[in-house]
Image (spheres, grey):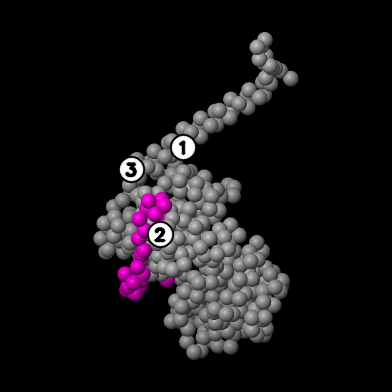
Amino acid sequence: MFWSSSADHPPVPIAALCGLFVSLWLLTRWGIEARQHRRRIDQLEYRVHVNGIRGKSTVTRIIAGMLREAGYVTIGKATGTEAVVVNRDGVDEVIQRKAAPTILEQIEVSEQYVDDTVQALVIECMALKPQYQEVSERMIVRSNIGVLTNVREDHQDVMGETLPEIARALLSTCPWNGVLVTAETNPEITPIIDEVAARRKSRVIYADPECVSDSDLDRFDYIAFKENVAIAVAIADLIGIPRNIAMDGMVKAPPDPGVLRMKDLAILGKRVTWANLFAVNDRESMVVAMEKLIPFMTPTTTTVGILNNRQDRERRAIQFAEVAVKDLTFDYLVTFGAFEGLVTDLIVDNGYPLDRILNLGDTHSPSVEHIIERMVGGMPTDHVLVVGFVNIHTHQAEMMLEYFEHEALPWEQGVS
């Protein structure tokens, strides 16, 4: 081993000196990059940080579209069904991740897309743990407009067990000395919003869904929710974008692939109406989404709900075994993915008839043809409404989605 020594100082290992120099170099580089990032972010006229349980990706996209339509050079970044940057031309660029996602991705996006010509950045919060949300706000986004879409029961393992605890976690991204816009109206939550915003010297704007008409929603080519649109309208009013321009921009914004769209398909001689709600995984949002499907039901419609359960989401599987029976109404329930025995037992315990449950998940690993035959061909009516919810990815769901997309004909073609 080599040593550096003198008469006045004890010997110091060369390796230790090298480690010290490397640490100093890394700290210096981090300091330079942090200052560069701060300058890059702070020169933006609008920095919008979108957080909440449901609707974050859609709200991020429609706010970015609205700003773009109003003439602001705008970059959006959403992490919904897939992580994308919505570039200044309003085109999705999928983020190719080489490792597990971290909040450092937000810095990388700003480095790549934000230059001196960009005026606005609308970015969806990708952190779950409150401490990471706090870092995202204070160190990365530094928003002057914050958004809290809503507070729902989800991610309790990291955000807290109760709605107030979840609200405080989500409010980690409330701006300092800015404006917070929210569509949350729960009286259990609004005092917390007011308290946190006051402590951070930010003003709260409560978006009013009643300002959004049914004709406004009809302009979207997917099923939009008034609360989401109302948030964007409130921001438009805040910064002076005319209502017609704001709505035009929202409608033009590319939607998240997971938005609720209805498909009418011709399968096994039946009309199948498919509602992809796999991204909906809390009770309140599911109840609201199902209300949107009422116009698609007739007295001769058989309704089929798919409980799509991931192996790493046991708690959610248990929760929705109750929601599916107590809060929703389906003629048949299908289990995909994991926990089929557990979920079936819970559904039956909640009073649902066993002969109306189809186990088509990991327990049996059926082919897609078998899934379609049981779920569609075996139904007693010529119109079947199929609704998927709880989680996005399982093997059975992916097979079924592939079938619906590439093998099933649209209803109009199937009957022609």
Q: Position of residue 207 (x, y in %)?
A: 36, 64
**Residue shown at 35% from the left, 42% from the top:** 43
The residue carrying mark 2 is 194
Q: Earlier in the sequence, mark 2 or mark 1?
A: 1
Q: Residues within 10 Å of mark 1 (few under 14, many from 20)?
A: some
Q: Which element carries disc 3, helix, strand or loop?
A: loop
Q: Nearer the viewer, residue 30 or 363?
A: 30
- The magenta segment is 197-224
Quadrant location, the N terminus = top right
Q: Position of residue 93 (x, y in %)?
A: 46, 52
Q: Residues within 10 Å of mark 3 (few under 14, many from 20)?
A: few
The residue carrying mark 3 is 117
**Residue shown at 55% from the left, 64% from the top:** 162
The residue carrying mark 1 is 34
Q: Position of residue 2 (x, y in %)?
A: 71, 18
Q: Residue furthest top?
A: 7
| Residue 14 visible in this rendered orientation of the protein | yes
In magenta stretch: residue 223: yes
Q: Nearer the viewer, residue 78 or 166?
A: 166
Q: Nearer the viewer, residue 344 or 218?
A: 344
